[in-house]
Image (cartoon, rainbow, N blue to C red):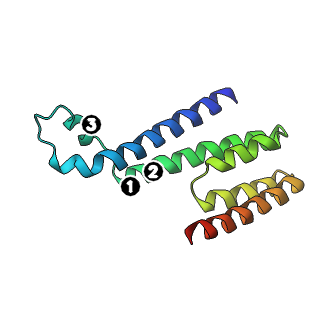
């Protein structure tokens, strides 16, 4: 489990760094010359599809960690990992996984968490 936690943290850090770089350096990418000191910083910025792939890989690792937490009966960690998930399909998989692993109480809490998160997202967009 510690290896998975470390891997999730590394992916999360890499993802946050790439998103930061994209937000700050993308606009300057077209104005850099090859002889500019910071050309290398803007040249290697990930495009949107690469960032989405990184988010998918992070979701896969989080789902694996959630599965291990459910099997070890560590429900608090399940919700910590659920906060790290990027896609709603991954959240729905967590609810199905809890049902299949015969953790009905946790499955109900997960479903409530998903509905609360959806409600929060709707209010944040307004």
Query: How many angstroms separate mark 3 from mark 2 (CA)?
Result: 21 Å
Dot label at residue 49: 1
Residue occupying image coordinates x 29% and y 45%: 25
Where does label 3 land, which residue? 41
C-alpha distance separating marks 3 and 1: 19 Å
> What is the residue that sits farthest to the bottom in this orientation?
126
| SS for callout 3 | helix
The image quadrant where one finds the N terminus is top right
Q: Position of residue 38 (x, y in %)?
A: 21, 34
Residue at 50% over, 36% down: 13
The C terminus sits in image quarter: bottom right
Q: From mark 2 to mark 1, how far is it between C-alphas? A: 6 Å
Q: Is 98 positioned to the left or the right of 81 in the image?
A: right
- Sequence-wise, which precedes: disc 3 or disc 1? 3
Q: Is residue 65 above or below residue 115?
A: above
Looking at the image, which residue sits at the far right? 105
Mark 3 or 2, nearer chain start = 3
Query: Which residue shows up at 45% across the image and 50% down it?
Result: 53
Residue at x 18% of width, y 50% of height: 30
Could you say which is closer to the camera, residue 37 or residue 80? 37
Q: Depth-wise, is mark 3 or mark 1 nearer the camera?
A: 3
Q: x%, y% of residue 8?
A: 58, 37
Is there CB contact under 8 Å for labels 2 and 1? yes
Dot 2 lies on which element? helix
Question: In front here: 104 or 36?
Answer: 36
**Residue at disc 1, secondary structure:** helix
Q: Residue 63: x, y in percent?
A: 66, 47
Q: Relative to residue 85, is residue 76 drawn left or right?
A: right
Query: Does residue 48 lie above or below 62 as drawn?
Result: below
Badge 2 local density, few (<14 within 10 Å), some, or many (20+)? few
Q: Which residue is mark 2?
A: 53
Contact check, label 3 and label 2, Cβ < 8 Å: no
């Amino acid at each position: 489990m510690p290896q998975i936690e470390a891997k999730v943290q590394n992916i999360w850090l890499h993802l946050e760094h790439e998103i930061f770089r994209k937000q700050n350096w993308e606009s300057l990418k077209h104005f850099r010359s090859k002889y500019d000191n910071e050309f290398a910083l803007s040249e290697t910025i990930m495009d949107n599809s690469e960032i989405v792939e990184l988010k998918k890989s992070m979701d896969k690792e989080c789902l694996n960690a959630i599965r291990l937490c459910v099997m070890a009966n560590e429900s608090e960690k399940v919700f910590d990992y659920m906060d790290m998930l990027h896609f709603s399909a991954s959240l729905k998989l967590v609810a199905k996984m809890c049902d299949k692993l015969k953790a009905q109480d946790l499955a109900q809490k997960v479903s409530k968490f998903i509905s609360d998160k959806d409600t929060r997202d709707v209010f944040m967009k307004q």
